Amino acid sequence: MAELLTSAQMRAIEKAAIDSGEVTGLDLMERAGAGVVNAVFEEWPDLAQSSYKAVVLCGPGNNGGDGFVITRLLKQRGWEVEVFLYGDPEKLPPDAKVNYERWAEMGEVAPYVDEEFQLDPAEYRETSVMFDALFGTGLTRAVEGFNEFAWHTQISEFRMAPKFRKGAFVGSRVVAVDAPSGLCADSGRYLATNDPYHESIRADLTVSFHRMKLGHVLADGPHACGKTVVVDIGLTERHKEAVQLTDPTIWELKKT
């Protein structure tokens, strides 16, 4: 079985790569966003044949920065993209803010207001994609405020079930960036324990970076993630070895 990482291990590998001077955080973010777009077209080749519609929900951290890269790359391919930001743009981490500003020169960013979020079923059909770039693997506690977006992904999943494909409406495809928001990337459990269908994204495709995380395969992970694929963002075993030399205890987390 391929190596599985915890969220802490993945962050440590990324930090080791950046600290080495071989790559910058912006480089990794650009590669991650491009990797997601390429993975989407590999999974659904029909989407690469023309320009379609996408909605991207970007979060307040670096996962949101990945989302802005995805948005820019799709726009460059002629896609019509609606972009929402869950959070304050002034509080974005530096690399994410750079990509927010790059996108802002090309198109609009709407603040995400949960009670106002709504998609037109007539527009968001099988040739559209919803991107969850909210929290990725960084989420460790239940949060509130994106229930409507989550509900849309749940309904899309239901309507894309094979027995419903012949119906008049087929929902948008859903892609999670690194991990579906609302899922713990270490345990694979939904973080909203009182109601797992509340504030939890359901993806058709999850695109993980460098390695799969434990949460992709444990507990509720497979159901939340759909199909999980891994894209290379230029991290190497050398970066992992650097982590093991400086902080060997972090690798003991996988054994507990």
Image: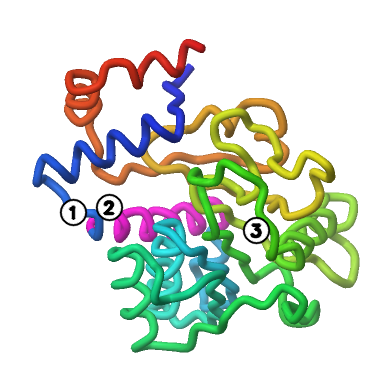
Picture coordinates of residue 256, whole percent (x, y): 51, 12
Amino acid of disc 2: Leu
Q: Residue furthest top?
A: 255
Element on which disc 2 rests: helix
Measured along the vertical axis of the image, is residue 232 above or below residue 123?
A: above
Q: CA distance from mark 3 to mark 1?
A: 29 Å
Classify 10 Å Cα crowding around label 2: few (below 14), some (14-19), many (20 and above). many
The residue segment tinted magenta is 27-44
Q: Chief secondary structure of the magenta span?
A: helix
Q: Which mark is residue 28?
A: 2
The residue that disc 3 covers is: 174
Classify 10 Å Cα crowding around label 3: few (below 14), some (14-19), many (20 and above). many
Q: Residue at x 48, y 16 (%)?
A: 1
Q: CA distance from mark 2 to mark 3?
A: 23 Å
Depth check: give the residue in front, 182 or 39: 182
Mark closer to the observer (3, 1): 1
Amino acid of disc 1: Thr
**Do the residues bearing badges 2 and 1 touch, measured as CB atoms within 8 Å?**
yes
Magenta span includes 34: yes
The residue that disc 1 covers is: 24
Magenta span includes 148: no
Q: Quadrant of residue 83?
A: bottom right
Looking at the image, tell me whether mark 2 or mark 3 is earlier in sequence order.
Answer: 2
Q: Residue furthest left?
A: 21
Element on which disc 3 rests: strand
